Image (cartoon, grey):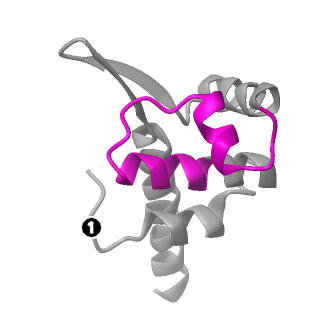
Amino acid sequence: MIPDALDFRFLLINYYKKMGLNEKELAVIFVTDYLIQEKNDLITGDILSLKMNFSAKEIDDILVNLLHKGYLEYNTDQQTMRTTLNPLRQRLYQEFQIEMSNEAKQSS
C-alpha cells in the first residue's frame, strides 16, 4: 500500500532513470495515469495516440515494453478489463523506502 502523501509523479520523476525507463515511456506513463484518473478503464495505444504525438504503433511498442518490465498491467474485474499502473507505483514506493533507509543509516 502506497501512502497518499507520496506523490506518484514526484516519485516517478525522481526514479524513472534508475528504474530503466526512458522519456518516451515516461510520457506514456504520465498520459496513461491521467486517463486512469479520468475514470478510463482500458488504455490502449489508439486512445493514447489521440492525446500524444506518437503513432499508435509506437505507443503499442512502448506499452509492450512497460508490460514486459512489469510496470503496467491489464486486469479483468467483473468482466471489465482495466489498465493499472499499480506495479509501477509499488516499485516506486520500494525505491523510495530503500533510499530513505539508506539515508537514515548514513545519518546514524
Q: What percent of the width, then of the height, locates residue 56?
A: 75, 30
Q: Is residue 74 above or below residue 101?
A: above
Q: What percent of the width, then of the height, locates residue 33?
A: 48, 51
Q: Residue furthest bottom?
A: 107
Q: Is residue 91 above or below residue 101?
A: above
Identity of the residue drawn at 46% across and 86% down: 108
Quarter holding residue 71 = top right
Q: Amino acid at mark 1?
A: Asp
Q: What percent of the width, then of the height, locates residue 80?
A: 28, 18
Q: Find disc 1 in the rendering and name its residue.
A: 4
Q: Nearer the viewer, residue 53 or 73?
A: 53
Task: From the viewer's perspective, tell me whether residue 5 is left or right of residue 27.
Answer: left
Q: Is residue 11 above or below residue 25?
A: below
Q: What percent of the width, then of the height, locates residue 16?
A: 68, 57
Magenta stretch bounds? 29-55
Q: Nearer the viewer, residue 105 or 13?
A: 13
Instruction: Specify whether residue 48 is painted magenta.
Output: yes
Identity of the residue drawn at 65% across and 30% down: 45
